[in-house]
Image (tube, rainbow, N blue to C red):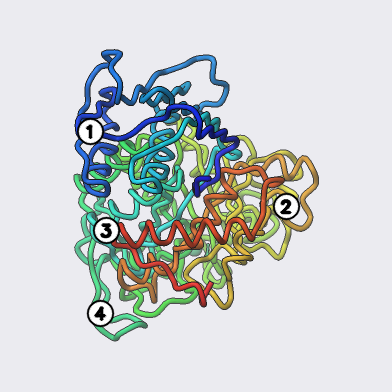
Amino acid sequence: MFNIIPQPVSILINQDRKGFTLHAGTTISPYPFAEEFASFVRKTLNKKVYLHEDTGEERSIILKIDESIEHDEGYTIKCENRRVFINARTETGLFYGLQTLKQMLLQTDGKLPYVELTDYPRFSYRGFMLDCGRYFYTVDEIKRIVDLMALHKLNVLHWHLTEDQGWRIEIKKYPLLTEKGSKRSHTNFNNKPHSGYYTQDQVKEIVAYCHDRKIKVIPEFDVPGHNVASIACYPELSCLDRKLEVATHWGVKHDILCAGKESTYKFVYDVLDELIELFPDKIIHIGGDEAPKTRWCECDKCKEKLNELGLVNMDQLQGYLANEAAAYLKKKGKKAICWNEAIKGGNVEKDNITVALWRDKTKASIEWANGGNPLIAECFTPYYVDYPYGMHPLKSVYMFEPRKIHGLTSLGGASVIGVESPIWTEYVTSFEKMTYLCFPRWLAVAETGWNNVNKKGYAKFIKTAEFFCDILKGMGITPAPKEYW
Ligand code: ACM
Ligand code: ZN
């Protein structure tokens, strides 16, 4: 039996019938993403696979678009008579078929029995959020993590790019954001300076790399909180024109973008304009988490805005700001995601926003989903993988059921479009630390994102996870040792 993560919907094996053996000289249909498969096989199994049109020869891997397959990301694999057939409705499905094939080949040293496999995902949104605001990961490190996402059939990179502690993306209209805003004098972690940003060309390179692996990239521009770095560059963005330095320590900051000044709205739209150009997937994350209203309550402009709009409290002013940003995106053909705090005021327009639930004492996000509006489950417990295994153990990640979050009705459960596991990086100051925290917990997130809940079995999963961690080690990744899980 094969150990495949995430487990496929169905697999039938017949040891008595002829299967497939990878040879030097195996060919694969020449889709661009087949290169990635060929290079993986060369590195891990030391066999050369050539991209070539199907000639009907033995020893070939044949990829075929097949409209009869129902799910957009679904695929079938058939290994028989020394050939592998992967059929899918879309190229994404073919790509996933190859990810599964990779995992099977690794387990058998390239020799497969007769196999019939059918597979498709449970959720359309299977995300990983990487905080590059606290710690700056290089382009190559991001590419390595993207490769791992693809292997686990995760399909959304939520790229957290703006923070109190660092603005990480070049915005041509506001050059100070990176000249000054990407540098902090020291960190919580080691008291040393830390800096870095992605040029627009590097952003395009990462987006293209993700697209080659069928991964969408959703950038996050956090509004109105977590903006000390941008305020340090442009003090007029804050309520009281505060002169600040880029934050050195993490935690929730009182100085946020002023919601009373027209210039703030212009700043938000200008940044969104550049993000829209750089990120062709249809969604932009507009943040909204942890935005205390201390300064807004002291600011004449914010108070005036609230009165002028007839709003009842500052949470509604945050809702108004989210609405304005979402409406701007809608005009440009894009959708918005926001953190659950943004909807606390109860006035957020429902037609263009998806809510990401991380922690919500008010239950506004539960009501949101129960009203049939889309929700992404990325609950602090247990999905925040920057927290230690002792707090968010593998079993709790595996057992987490996104459609049964407390308070969700059946309509609420059906409104959950997927899962996402975030990593916040104030203390995650290397690629090795990141992967140690992610693995094996990602395996559980991938299972939940892809599989139907009624197939869950922790004992079996653990066996697969042990096996899979060996595969990861072979790829130069160090998962947490089992005693920590
Ligand atoms: C968050 O963890 N502040 C979304
Ligand atoms: Zn203000």
What is the CA distance from the residue labelled 2 to the residue labelled 3? 36 Å
Q: Is residue 235 visible?
A: no
The residue identified by callout 3 is 141
Compare marks 1 and 3 and give the one earlier in the sequence.
1
Q: Distance between the Cα atoms at labels 4 and 3?
A: 23 Å
Where residue 173 appears, as percent x and y from the top left, is: 24, 48
Q: How many neighbours does mark 2 have within 10 angstroms: few (below 14), some (14-19), or many (20 or more)?
A: many
Q: Earlier in the sequence, mark 1 or mark 4?
A: 1
The disc placed on residue 185 is 4
Q: Is residue 166 left or right of residue 50?
A: right
Cα–Cα gap, marks 1 and 4:
49 Å
- Residue 194 falls in image quadrant: bottom left
Callout 1 touching callout 3 (CB < 8 Å): no
Task: State the SS at label 3.
Answer: helix
Tell me if the residue at label 2 has its CB under 8 Å from ligand 1.
no
- The answer to whether 331 appears left or right of 212 in the picture is right
Label 1 SS: strand
Which residue lies under the disc numbered 2? 366
Residue 407 image position (x, y, % from top left): 79, 55
Q: Residues within 10 Å of mark 4 (few under 14, many from 20)?
A: some
Judged from the image, the secondary structure of the residue bearing numbered disc 2 is helix
Residue bearing the label numbered 1: 49
Residue 21: percent from left, percent from top: 33, 34
Query: Closer to the N terminus: mark 4 or mark 3?
Result: 3
